[in-house]
Image (tube, helix red, strand yellow):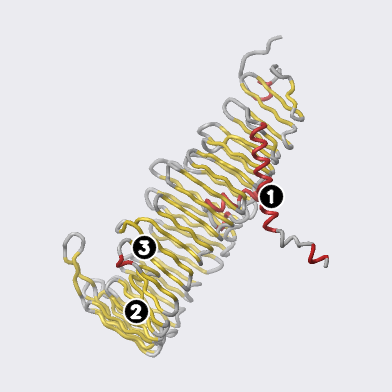
């Protein structure tokens, strides 16, 4: 009887979450009213401060549980990790997340999309060729599209009956009682599938083929021509592909009718051979391979592939004995590793960029640098999972964060940084070299220190101690009581390096 009359905490979970949200909003509203005249510092209970890395302000309530931020034209509020909302009127952008990535809503201009864990999704808005297009998906059961052009309308109920257009890497898909029958079209090639993937028949301009997988298959395409966007005739290469007892025997000829005709013969796992005007390759037992690439001007020996590789020539130089040592050089790319994955270094320099990345045990340590060779500007990202994250952008903005539990796996994912990072950012340090501003925050502003070109501010332990200095002197609050109101503290110049008028006796 007692269990019936007393609900469990699990039963009251929605009510508890709702009460918590209401409490946070109440604290935020009261603090904003009490501190209407100046930015309050009572972290982590409540704090409001100017942003360091850009123009704007941020308010926080109960540490990481609620924050509101205005940066430029973008406004964000969030209850990490439950709910967040971002809006930027200038960019015509709106984003709403609930337990990201469980439920999300994104709107950019007239385009919108919401999804529930990628299983249920709804997208819509104008397209370049249509005034409106709406898609609804209940993956993998139901797919629907309604367009201003009725030709693009479709409905599919898998696996019973359906017709889709421009989905799943095909221009058109039609099926009845899948896998018993399905027809797909990609460009001008139509494939009829029976008991997919065992039997199919292909047809198209100058092309025909069939397969009874894995027993035998055949596909042949004649050399054809087409008119390009400049109204010029172009040759479309032909090909001839056949197999028996796949993958025991496969033979293909590609590039027919062009100067790049290539022939491939495979008998897996015993033997494979490729011959073309630009490249020859021969392998045995799928482990021992020799490559002569005349186009890129190098020769390669693999024994066994891909663990041991040696290559020499203008186009490639390689010495690879995995996992002990690996060094590969090709034009505009170089990679080195020692006892992979303990140490690995990549270097790419496609003009005008120069990118380098050093990794130890994948994400335990990762240091990525990117430099613009024309402007000389650089950016850097250092991950020391799970303890550290350091970023510096092209403008010189510098940021350190301790802890960083998942940021290393999804670098640059702004929704992770917005919805989850505040929960474990125990220490944050930021520096803006353009404005001369810097800040440090410990335990969600339990301790906060800010510096600008003209001021210094320090707050500690719910604001019980606050200090501020500027050109006129230094002001201190102790237990929320202003000390020396209207007076200037001697020694402010020596303590803080702040210049200003001399004290009067």
Residue 266 % position (x, y):
38, 83
- Nearer the observer: mark 2 or 1; the answer is 1
The residue tagged 2 is 183
Q: Furthest residue to the right? A: 2
Q: Residues within 10 Å of mark 1 (few under 14, many from 20)?
A: few
Horizontal relation, residue 460 to residue 208: left or right: right
Q: Quadrant of the N terminus?
A: bottom right
Proximity of marks 2 and 1: CB atoms separated by less than 8 Å: no
The residue tagged 3 is 315
Proximity of marks 3 and 2: CB atoms separated by less than 8 Å: no
**From mark 3 to mark 2, how far is it between C-alphas?**
43 Å
Q: Quadrant of the C terminus?
A: top right
Horizontal relation, residue 10 to residue 170: left or right: right
- Nearer the observer: mark 3 or 1; the answer is 1
The quadrant where residue 485 appears? top right
- The vertical placement of 276 against 379, above or below, is below
**From mark 3 to mark 1, how far is it between C-alphas?**
63 Å
Residue 439 or residue 104, whichever sits in front:
104
Q: Residue at x 37, y 50 (%)?
A: 351
- Nearer the observer: mark 3 or 2; the answer is 2
- Where disc 3 sits, the SS reads loop
Residue 236 % position (x, y):
22, 71
Earlier along the polypeptide chain: callout 2 or callout 1?
1
The residue tagged 1 is 20
Residue 66 % position (x, y):
63, 46
């Amino acid at each position: 009887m007692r269990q019936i009359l007393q609900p469990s905490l699990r039963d009251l979970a929605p009510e508890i979450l709702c009460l918590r949200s209401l409490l946070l909003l109440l604290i935020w509203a009261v603090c904003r009213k009490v501190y209407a005249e100046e930015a309050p510092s009572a972290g982590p209970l409540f704090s409001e401060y100017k942003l360091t890395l850009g123009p704007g302000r941020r308010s926080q309530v109960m540490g990481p549980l609620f924050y509101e931020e205005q940066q430029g034209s973008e406004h964000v509020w969030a209850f990490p990790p439950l709910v967040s909302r971002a809006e930027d009127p200038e960019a015509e952008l709106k984003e709403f997340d609930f337990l990201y990535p469980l439920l999300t809503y994104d709107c950019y201009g007239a385009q919108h999309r919401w999804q529930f864990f990628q299983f249920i999704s709804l997208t819509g808005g104008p397209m370049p060729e249509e005034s409106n297009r709406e898609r609804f998906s209940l993956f993998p059961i139901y797919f629907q599209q309604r367009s201003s052009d009725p030709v693009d309308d479709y409905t599919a109920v898998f696996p019973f009956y359906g017709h889709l257009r421009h989905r799943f890497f095909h221009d058109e898909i039609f099926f009845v009682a899948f896998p018993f029958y399905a027809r797909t079209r990609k460009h001008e090639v139509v494939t009829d599938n029976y008991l997919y993937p065992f039997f199919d028949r292909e047809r198209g301009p100058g092309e025909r083929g069939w397969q009874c997988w894995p027993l035998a298959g055949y596909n042949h395409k004649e050399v054809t021509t087409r008119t390009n966007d400049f109204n010029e005739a172009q040759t479309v290469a032909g090909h001839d592909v056949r197999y028996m007892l796949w993958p025991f025997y496969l033979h293909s000829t590609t590039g027919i009718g062009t100067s790049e005709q290539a022939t491939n013969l495979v008998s897996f796992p015993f033997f494979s051979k490729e011959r073309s005007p630009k490249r020859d390759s021969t392998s045995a037992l799928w482990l021992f391979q020799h490559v002569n690439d005349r186009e890129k001007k190098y020769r390669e020996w693999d024994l066994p592939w891909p663990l041991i590789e040696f290559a020499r020539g203008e186009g490639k130089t390689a010495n690879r004995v995995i996992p002990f040592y690996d060094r590969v050089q090709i034009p505009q790319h170089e990679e080195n590793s020692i006892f992979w994955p303990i140490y690995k270094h990549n270097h790419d320099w496609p003009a005008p960029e120069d990118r380098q990345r050093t990794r130890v045990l994948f994400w335990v340590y990762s240091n990525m640098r990117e430099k613009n060779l024309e402007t000389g500007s650089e950016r850097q990202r250092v991950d020391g999972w799970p303890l550290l994250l350091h970023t510096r952008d092209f403008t010189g903005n510098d940021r350190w964060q301790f802890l960083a539990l998942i940021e290393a796996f999804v670098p640059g994912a702004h929704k992770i940084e917005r919805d989850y990072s505040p929960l474990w950012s125990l220490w944050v340090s930021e520096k803006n070299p353009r404005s001369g501003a810097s800040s440090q925050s410990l335990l969600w502003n339990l301790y906060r220190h800010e510096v600008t070109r003209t001021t210094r501010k320090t707050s500690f332990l719910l604001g019980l101690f606050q200090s501020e200095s500027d050109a006129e002197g230094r002001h201190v609050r102790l237990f929320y009581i202003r000390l020396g109101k209207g007076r200037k503290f001697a020694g402010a110049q020596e303590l803080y390096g702040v210049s200003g008028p001399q004290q009067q006796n």
